[in-house]
Image (tube, rainbow, N blue to C red):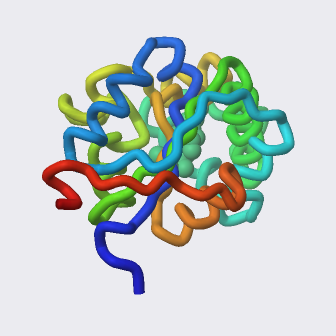
Amino acid sequence: MKHPKEEQTYVMIKPDGVRKGLTGEIIKRFEQRDLKIVALEMFQPGHEQLDNHYPKNEEWITRLGHKTLTTYEKYGYDAMLDFGTIDPVVIGPEIRKWLIDYMKTAPLVKMIVQGVHAVDVVRKIAGPTMPYLAEVGTIRGDFSIDSPALANKEKRAVMNIIHCSETPEEAAHEIKHWFGDVKVCDYKRFGVDE
Ligand code: GDP
């Protein structure tokens, strides 16, 4: 059993976060909450690595399709007109493709963030998936207003500044995928570790 301070999560600053010059601001928000950055790199991954990052199982892909259809219903848009179908099994892969295309438009910053309840706390600091719904004070709520209504119309992924793992299991999987067997940096934070 790991010590509570050793919980790790995976964070990736997406192209809009990098291009808005938010790398420092985002790191600052994690550090000021007493979370510790133990690995960090700016890089530009290839198609295959991105493709393997996003789940390929039907459940995840169909969930993406359903989410999109919900937005269309909510705003009275015609999914049939934009996608030629209202089947979430067909729409899901389309959104997944938009996501991968978007992730290739600029360098990304990947990091491992460590600390007490790192997974949940980082998601709280990030805010919910849709920036237009995110509270002021969260990263997505302070630096983006994007919405699926707009993104779907423009046939692109919702630009929401960062990606962060949803569960400790997903974090372990994503850390392995993006960092391999890298040895994380070990240091003591003043006021946190001593
Ligand atoms: P996350 O864990 O908060 O990033 O959210 P998800 O795993 O549900 O979705 C992955 C990514 O897909 C999100 O971060 C968005 O960039 C994008 N996305 C999710 N839902 C939609 C949608 O309905 N429309 C569009 N265009 N993009 C979406």
Q: Dividing the image into four equal quarters, which quarter contains ligand 1? A: top right
For the question of whether residue 62 can be seen, the reply is no
**Image coordinates for residue 177, horizontal then vertical, percent:** 70, 56
Q: Is residue 167 left or right of residue 116?
A: right
Q: Quadrant of the C terminus?
A: bottom left
Q: Is residue 38 left or right of residue 45?
A: left
Q: Is residue 38 left or right of residue 3?
A: right
**Residue closest to the eye, 89 or 174:** 174
For the question of whether residue 53 can be seen, the reply is yes
**Residue closest to the eye, 179 or 17:** 179
Position of 101 relative to 10 (above/below) = above
**Residue furthest left as drawn:** 191
**Residue closest to the eye, 96 or 110:** 110
**Image coordinates for residue 33, horizontal then vertical, percent:** 20, 45
Q: Quadrant of the N terminus?
A: bottom left
Q: Is residue 24 left or right of residue 178?
A: left
**Image coordinates for residue 80, horizontal then vertical, percent:** 70, 33
Q: Quadrant of residue 110?
A: top right
Q: Residue at x 50, y 30 (%)?
A: 148
**Image coordinates for residue 49, horizontal then vertical, percent:** 79, 44
